[in-house]
Amino acid sequence: METAISAEGLRKRYAEHDVLAGIDLTVATGEVLGLLGPNGAGKTTIVRILATLLPFDGGKVTIAGFDLSKDKREIRRRIGLTGQYAAVDAILTGRENLRLIGVLLGLGRRKAQARADELLEQFDLTKAANRPAKSYSGGMRRRLDLAASLVTTPTVLFLDEPTTGLDVTSRMLLWRMVRDQVDNGVSILLTTQYLEEADQLADRIVVLDKGGFIAEGTPEELKRKVGGERLEVSVATEAELPAVVRALGHATTEAPSVDERAKVVSIPLVGGMGTLASVTAELKAAGSEPVDFAIRRSSMDDVFLALTGQTVPAGQAVPTDHPAVERTSQGERAA
């Protein structure tokens, strides 16, 4: 596959701190690469460097076939950027924002107007086109911001936490619009604090921590890497939990995780059907009749916690039944 973004040995240093310690990164044409990592891991630094906004201290970078050290002007003609906060002018209308960007980028007034109208329709903003952007909802402003990054029809798009602060409906609408760009062959580098977002949009994910990548793969590969599936057993009353914990404890070497509030006990499903059969026999011997059995696949929350050892980023709640969290009899959490 053709390469849209390539970085070899990318370095960035502030005083005595290596923000990026020689990372290698590639994004194929038409691919979405998701960047995950704790706050301060360097995700936004990578985006700012690749988008020509920040100098780098070492390595070689090419964007859309052009050398970042020599051809910034050519690269800027081929990229779009949506940052963490909407960058549109609040006083101008939606149409005026897009038209102004088109003129500033050299489209000419007529082409800028035509492109603005096209994007307003594409992003479902036509009815609000003549209203000041300050009157837009958060979701509308983010859609306008994404539209602004597409005025010159870029082949490479950088999305730095594009849906931060949006409600679920607005987030899903923006996801659809991002997928539309991928369908048109646009290559995307995405940073996000929403792990579900990376799972939904990214073809591949790299996890960044302490200036370097600590894991890479498709969402499914990373989920399998951190433990695969878990068996969850639900009971009707809290009084039944101790018996279920003992029964499941006989089927695994790992202490069962207990969610007292949901009345659920879970263990890793490492033995497949053999584990299911063993658990069923143990429960029958204990005289327990569960309300439900469920097999839960690992999530991106599990991946993040397992690889970084840190809590899920802001905006994401750690599931109370997460394998890294056991609940004591007092309902406290112990990692």
Image: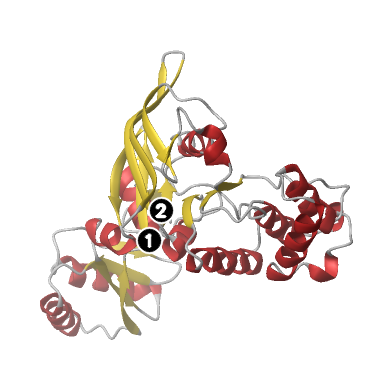
Which disc is residue 328 wearing? none
Q: CA distance from mark 1 to mark 2?
A: 6 Å
Residue 126 position in % (x across, y down): 80, 69
* Residue 49 seen in render: yes
**The residue tagged with tag 2: helix, strand or loop?**
strand
Q: Is residue 184 above or below residue 85?
A: below
The local crowd at label 2, few if under 14, some if 14 to 19, many if 20 or more residues have their Cα within 10 Å, is many
Label 1's element? loop
Picture residue at 65% right of the left edge, 58% below the top: 166
> Which of 317 and 186 lies nearest the eye of the viewer?
186
Q: Is residue 325 visible?
A: no
Residue sitting at 45 percent across and 25 percent down? 56
Q: Which residue is mark 1?
A: 203
Q: Is residue 125 left or right of residue 329?
A: right
Q: Give the residue drawn at x 10%, y 78%.
A: 274
Residue 25 spot, x, y in % from top left = 34, 42
According to the picture, the residue beneath numbered tag 2 turns out to be 33
Please indicate whether residue 96 sits to the left or right of residue 264 in the image: right
Which kind of residue does numbered mark 2 sit on?
Leu
Q: Nearer the viewer, residue 94 or 103?
A: 103
Q: Disc 1 residue type?
A: Asp
Q: Report the front residue among 169 and 45.
A: 45
